[in-house]
Amino acid sequence: MNCFDRQNEVFKVREMPSGVEYTVDLRRQCCDCGEFQVDQISCRHVFACSANQRLDWQVYVHEVYKMDQVRQVYRARFKPLGNPTIWPAYNGPRFVPNPYMRQVSKGCPWMTRFLNKMDTQMLHRPRRCRQCGAEGHSRSICCQAGGASAGNNAQ
């Protein structure tokens, strides 16, 4: 971090791996990265300036994010909603959902990735039974179904 002007609280911060430099103006509460202006909460460059110059970083956090403001929101008493059966009828607009955009609740989700050559080769090879090891059928229809217990019954 380089100090441009300590009196005006303007600093230059360089990120180490990339070498990109950002100008931080603490008085105007702006940084070249844009996060400080948009979120109104200190970005990593502001923290670097605060740590280097031994400044209190909490000064640069907007009032909305402080616990005093959160407590003020919940200080008011909320009126209970009551029983939904006695609510007045709703006469506003009705929204009809698009049935094609509805998420299917049963079964596996649809695969959305694009298949490559290796995937298509794996999908088109013949089935191999996990019970007997033969190709062409699965374990559920294998003639050796029952495994070890079927072998014990034969003896």
Image (tube, helix red, strand yellow):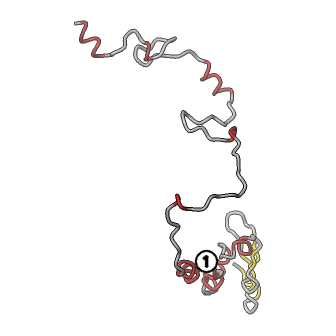
Q: Of 104 and 125, which appears nearest the observer?
A: 104
- Say left or right for 127 vs 49: left
Above or below residue 46? Residue 154 is above
Image quarter of the N terminus: bottom right
Residue 105: horizontal and vertical position, in percent? 56, 38
Secondary structure type for disc 1: helix
Tag count: 1
What residue did someone put label 1 on? 65
Looking at the rendering, which quadrant does residue 130 occupy? Answer: top left
Image quarter of the C terminus: top left
Residue shown at 53%/61% (left/top)?
86
Residue shown at 74%/79% (left/top)?
24
Above or below residue 36? Residue 93 is above
Which residue type carries mark 1?
Answer: Tyr
Residue 142: horizontal and vertical position, in percent? 42, 12
Above or below residue 78? Residue 112 is above
Above or below residue 69? Residue 135 is above
The residue sitting at the top extreme is: 154
Q: Of 33 and 72, which appears nearest the observer?
A: 72
Q: Of 27 and 93, which appears nearest the observer?
A: 93
Residue 10: horizontal and vertical position, in percent? 75, 84
Looking at the rendering, which quadrant does residue 120 occupy? Answer: top right
Residue shown at 50%/66% (left/top)?
82
